[in-house]
Image (cartoon, rainbow, N blue to C red):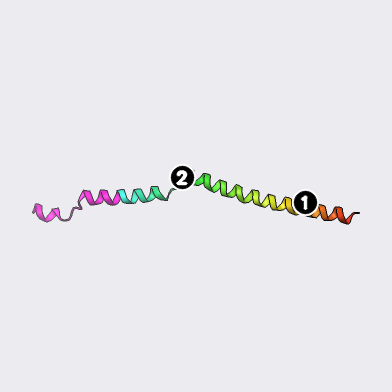
């Protein structure tokens, strides 16, 4: 009777391996502080580019208006 019940109980090694695999996957999907830093740098880089373009346009309109003002 004991042999018949043994095949119904999952092996703990398989379950632990599956659980460890799922846990490793979940940890890999979490974002790290390094990821956050890179995202912030990318955002700030875009913002600097936008401000540079705005400054360039402002300077261009300032020089054209000073030429027109003569």
Q: Secondary structure at mark 1?
A: helix
- Residue, x 31% and y 51% (percent of image)? 21
Question: Residue 55: image x %, image y %?
Answer: 73, 50
Q: Residue furthest top?
A: 33
Please give the residue where the numbered disc 2 appears in the rendered image.
Answer: 32
Residues under labels 2 and 1: Cα distance? 41 Å
Q: Which residues are magenta?
A: 1-19
Q: Secondary structure at mark 2?
A: loop
Q: Examine the residues drawn in magenta and state their main secondary structure.
A: helix
Quadrant where the C terminus sits is bottom right
- Residue, x 33% and y 51% (percent of image)? 22
Q: How many marks?
A: 2
Q: Nearer the viewer, residue 55 or 16?
A: 55
Q: Is residue 9 part of the magenta span, yes or no?
A: yes
- Residue, x 81% and y 52% (percent of image)? 62
Q: Nearer the viewer, residue 35 or 57?
A: 57
For disc 2, the neighbor class at 10 Å (few under 14, some 14 to 19, many from 20) is few
Is 38 placed left or right of 21 in the picture? Answer: right
Quadrant where the N terminus sits is bottom left
Q: Nearer the viewer, residue 44 or 27?
A: 44
For disc 1, the neighbor class at 10 Å (few under 14, some 14 to 19, many from 20) is few
Question: Residue 27: image x %, image y %?
Answer: 39, 47
Q: Residue furthest left?
A: 1
Mark before the other along the chain sequence, 2 or 1: 2
Q: Which of the numbered marks, if any, corresponds to residue 59? A: 1
Question: Residue 23: image x %, image y %?
Answer: 34, 48
| Cβ atoms at labels 2 and 1 below 8 Å apart | no
Q: Nearer the viewer, residue 12 or 62?
A: 62
Q: Which of the numbered marks, if any, corresponds to residue 18? A: none
């Amino acid at each position: 009777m004991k042999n018949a019940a043994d095949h119904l109980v999952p092996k703990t090694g398989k379950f632990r391996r599956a659980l460890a695999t799922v846990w490793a996957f979940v940890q890999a999907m979490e974002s790290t502080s390094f990821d956050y830093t890179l995202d912030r740098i990318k955002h700030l880089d875009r913002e600097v580019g936008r401000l540079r373009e705005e400054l360039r346009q402002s300077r261009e309109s300032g020089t054209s208006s000073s030429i027109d003002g003569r």
